[in-house]
Image (cartoon, rainbow, N blue to C red):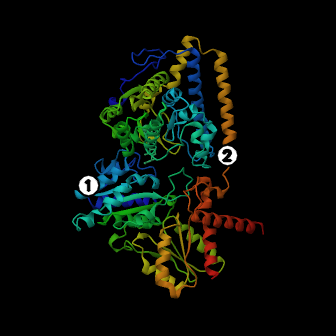
Amino acid sequence: MHTHGGNDFVQLLTPEGERRDHPDYPLDITGDEVRALYRDLVMMRRFDLEATALQRHGELGLFTPIIGQEAAQIGAGRAMRPGDFAYTSYREHGIAWCRGIEPLTLMGLFRGVTNGGWNPYEHNMSIYSIVIGDHVPHAVGYAMGIQRDGTDDVALAFFGDGATSQGDVHESFVFAAAFHSPVLFFLQNNHFAISVPVETQSRQQLVKRAEGYGIPGIRVDGNDVLASLAVTRAALKRIREGGGPMLIEAVTYRMGSHTTSDDPTRYRSNEHLEHWATRDPLERVLRLMEREGWADDAFMASLDDEANVMGATLRDGTRALTPPDPLTMFDHVYAEPHQQVTDDRAFLARYLQAAQSGDES
Amino acid sequence: MVAALNAALRASLDRDSKVLLMGEDIAILGGVFRVTDGLVKDYGEQRVVDTPLAESTIIGAAVGLAMRGYRPVCEIQFDGFVFPAFDQIVTQVAKLRVRTDGQVAMPIVIRLPFGGGIGAVEHHSESPEAYFVHTPGLRVMAPATPADAFVMLQQAIASDDPVIFLEPKRRYWDRGEVDLAVDIAHATPMGRARVTRSGSDVTIACYGPMLRTCLEAADVAAGEGRSLEVIDLRSLSPIDFPTLVASVERTSRLVVVHEAQGMASVGAEIAAVVAERCFWSMEAPVIRVAGFHTPYPPNRLEQHYLPDVERILDAVDRSLAY
Ligand SMILES: Cc1ncc(C[n+]2csc(CCOP(=O)(O)OP(=O)(O)O)c2C)c(N)n1
Ligand SMILES: [Mg+2]
């Protein structure tokens, strides 16, 4: 357990809400900036609650909770520039939030009305990737494009501890190192791949893999939004300046179930959960704000209001997400006309029409 | 059906100490569908193995285990996640026997929950059977009932050939009689189709999740005075053409039903072979009811994509109209 649970990581805010300095990752941050980060965290926690409730009420087929991982994602997401491009898996709601994707937009996938939901170019974030590790090489290729275009943008790949076992992810490290590409590998070690503990994926800290590929690696307290922000900023700066790829391992914990279909009591102890509950990513920011006098009633009340509005929007909006016309399933399969698609579409159109006129008669 | 598969795994683990199970989340969790529930407790971590998250090496390692005399049964968590292992399956698992002039056996079973209809997110509802059927060296089996799941999985594990074992995930919760005392050696042989329901007007060929749907269609048709013969293929490689041909020679009509896309599919192969062998007894062309030529749609549209009773009856009507 200690291998992956140890505290040898960059931490700028302790679970008790005390600031820590770090020689390599200094962070000057104002009260307003901390409040903005706290707002992000609160909104994500609320999003998680609302989406989970919607699933329970049968409005979503499935949901992938973010709870526990808000700080890792918000820190990284807020360190990105608009021109950077993110590739993520299915739990990165915090990255989507930072890329300006409305929480309601994310519901389409989980409600089963779309397999994507947004225009990747509008947000500089690709659609969620469900097949583990598949999207990581995409970030490398995007970064190879950036190199050829000569800009200082960075491609980011977000993936989990389980994903680190996939060949695609290993091969991505090899490519990125070989071509010195501007890509940041952001690994959230939430300690589980469904039921399989991170120890099964690696006998040593995952960050140590980086060295073997010739990539600098940094291990950060993933429940500390300040550390995640500072470390990601520093990594992005180095990459922009031509430093080549980097790996960040954000050590965090999946406080919820893997998905709403999962029953974590089958494979993990309460003890573990309780331990991690004392390291909650929101709590420590609140303590800091209280200590510094940034958590005044007006701010806290306005935050509450904002979360309530988002909750209402999510609830009403999700219920209003209706399935598209069945014939849209044939749209965009190819760029050019394709005979089999044309034939099958025509078949279904005739079939639906016949069924409809049958119903009416 | 889940309990039948679990019992088949137990029986195989009991019968042969070389049988071992590998996959993601199969041990402590018992599999996301609970097919391997309780097995690690009873057979231990050497025989029921939670692997790292890497399908290619689940299968690649199974090849090595097989060469060392073991009989690995690998679970791929969902149909859509078999593709990272595709190279190992089609290049190694399928060919090692022939490349070594028969010296090396590949008694590997790859269990694959497949098909749609459960309202899942994308990549969880695929029907990839044609890729494997197309590959010489692999056997491909798809049980449709709990009783067959129990028998066929044990046969697959006992076989010295590699088997892609397609489990119809939307039928996992189906109930049915299972004879736990059945003698595998004397049960319906591997590779044999079964006439599940006899009829005289149209032959319906199907497998896996579609058997139940086709039987429902046959019930409705019977109410309308049409007699459908429903054949459960059970095996997709080999395909039991003698059984199919005998049926079509009696009914003169064939409808093939599967969830997988129709283009270059099992249905396409059946249509071609039946046309070759039954040309003079056919009254109508073979009609396929299949998935469309588009990626599996978002689940709120899946009822329009999946063959259902109405679409099967529509095909029956078209066949009878000739
Ligand atoms: C290639 C592939 N294999 C299996 C799965 C099934 N699956 C979905 S999530 C998951 C665990 C992923 O763990 P990790 O990478 O740590 O990400 P986390 O869910 O913890 O965020 C598995 C095995 C999948 N989606 N893709
Ligand atoms: Mg994980």
Image quadrant for the C terminus of chain A?
bottom right
Q: Secondary structure at mark 2?
A: loop
Q: Eyeballing the image, is A232 above or below A328? A: above
Could you say where residue B317 lies in the image, as x and y percent from the top left?
64, 77
Question: Label 1: few (<14), some or many (≥20) within 10 Å?
Answer: few
Task: Identify residue for label 2.
Answer: A321
Task: Name the one closer to the observer, A361 or A148.
Answer: A148
Image quadrant for the N terminus of chain A?
top left
Could you say where residue A249 lies in the image, as x and y percent from the top left?
40, 31
| Chain letter belonging to callout 2 | A
Residue drawn at the location 61% of the way across and 59% of the way down: B303
Both on one chain, marks 2 and 1?
A: no
Residue type for callout 1: Gly
Residue drawn at the location 58% of the way across and 27% of the way down: A40
Which disc, if any, is residue B64? 1
| Chain letter belonging to callout 1 | B
* Apparent side of residue A297 relative to residue A198 in the rendered image (left or right): right
Q: Secondary structure at mark 1?
A: helix
Quarter of the image for residue A127 reads top right
Instruction: State whether residue A278 appears in this view.
Output: no
Quarter of the image for residue B20 reads bottom left
Residue type for callout 2: Leu
Q: Eyeballing the image, is A24 above or below A137? A: above
Question: Label 2: few (<14), some or many (≥20) within 10 Å?
Answer: some
Instruction: State whether residue A312 appears in this view.
Output: yes
